[in-house]
Amino acid sequence: MKKNIYAILLAFVASFALMSCSDDDPSSESIFPTTSPKRDAFDKWLLENYTFPYNVEMKYKMEDIESDMKYHLVPADSAKTAKLSIIMKYLWFDAYNEVVGPDFIKENMPRTIHFIGSPAYNSEGTMVLGTAEGGLKITLYMVNSLDDKTLKDYDTMNTYYFHTLHHEFTHILNQKIPYDQSFKLITESGYVSGDWYTISDKTAHQAGFITPYAMVEPLEDFAEMLSGYVTMSQSEWNAILADAGTTGAASISAKLDIVRNYMQESWNVDIDQLRAAVLRRASTLSAVDLEHLN
């Protein structure tokens, strides 16, 4: 009886193995896409102006894998993304290209820039304008809030986009080469972590910070210093120093010296030249053609 049971089991296992082997035969069909994606005129422009020259992929057709799912987000409008992409190239990529050359951009710009249509709100009500991830990706929010008037207004565009881009890019540079740790000692007792949004600009200035957000931690402070300096006019910068008073202004100036030395010694970037390029381009923003993909 046992022999018969064993024989039946052996036959069953053998037949299952044969069936499994048959099912596992490799298919001649590739699991990867074998045809090029369909691209419209804007997609082709992105390839020619970002991907091919700088190895940067621009994504605006929102993908779950690229998005932070803790927020309720919507995709970016393609027409508004196109206009923002034109301005980004003019004010950000081309400014760095002018000052330090294309190789710097190829080697250090994020590999992906991801556009999101809606804002991202934190639980306490603060709004996320942008994020940088692992030195590889920058995400920009609120694209669908853009209109033609806003696009030509440098102050507004800087507040919501270009200050953010320079800030997040600073994080990428810091991830590659750390800055002098003496920076955090200048206002070491002033960092407040998550309570920054309860602090006024004047209080932050007098404590030695150029924005309340700079008070979160030294990393954010450093990024705020660089992004603020290269996007503000000298009169705007002087107004912050005046508002800060003697002690606050001394701290801000000491931090700026470290930022300036870091960018020059680590990256061969003169931040005064970069600032001049950014502000000169900003002064002609209203003349930039946003209706045609040239």
Image (cartoon, rainbow, N blue to C red):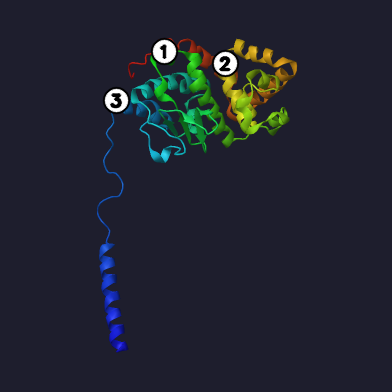
Q: What element carries label 2?
A: loop
Residue bearing the label numbered 2: 232
Disc nearest the viewer among 1 and 3? 1
Using the numbered discs, state the Cα–Cα distance from disc 1 to disc 3 in whole angstroms.
Answer: 24 Å
Residue bearing the label numbered 1: 149
Q: Is mark 1 on a helix, strand or loop?
A: helix
Quarter that holds the N terminus: bottom left
Query: What residue appears at the point 43 percent right and 30 percent down from the top-left corner?
Result: 54
Q: Nearer the viewer, residue 140 or 32?
A: 140
Which amino acid is tagged 2? Met
Near mark 3 (Cα within 10 A), the count class, few <14, some 14-19 or many ≥20, is few
Disc nearest the viewer among 2 and 1? 1
Query: What residue appears at the point 49 percent right and 22 percent down from the top-left corner?
Result: 160
Looking at the image, which residue sits at the far bottom?
Answer: 1
Near mark 1 (Cα within 10 A), the count class, few <14, some 14-19 or many ≥20, is few
Q: In this view, does 238 lie above or below 34?
A: above
Q: Which of 2 and 265 is in front in this view?
A: 2
Q: Name which of mark 2 and mark 3 comes first in the sequence.
A: 3
Using the numbered discs, state the Cα–Cα distance from disc 2 to disc 3 in whole angstroms.
Answer: 34 Å
Q: Which of 113 and 139 is in front in this view?
A: 139
Residue bearing the label numbered 3: 41
Using the numbered discs, state the Cα–Cα distance from disc 2 to disc 1 in whole angstroms.
Answer: 20 Å
Answer whether labels 1 and 3 touch (C-beta < 8 Å): no
Residue 264 pos. (x, y %) = 61, 25
Does residue 208 appear in the picture of this structure? Answer: yes
Q: Is mark 3 on a helix, strand or loop?
A: helix
Q: In this view, does 28 lie above or below 35?
A: below
Residue 5 pos. (x, y %) = 30, 84
Q: Name which of mark 1 and mark 3 comes first in the sequence.
A: 3
Q: Name which of mark 2 and mark 1 comes first in the sequence.
A: 1
Quarter that holds the C terminus: top left
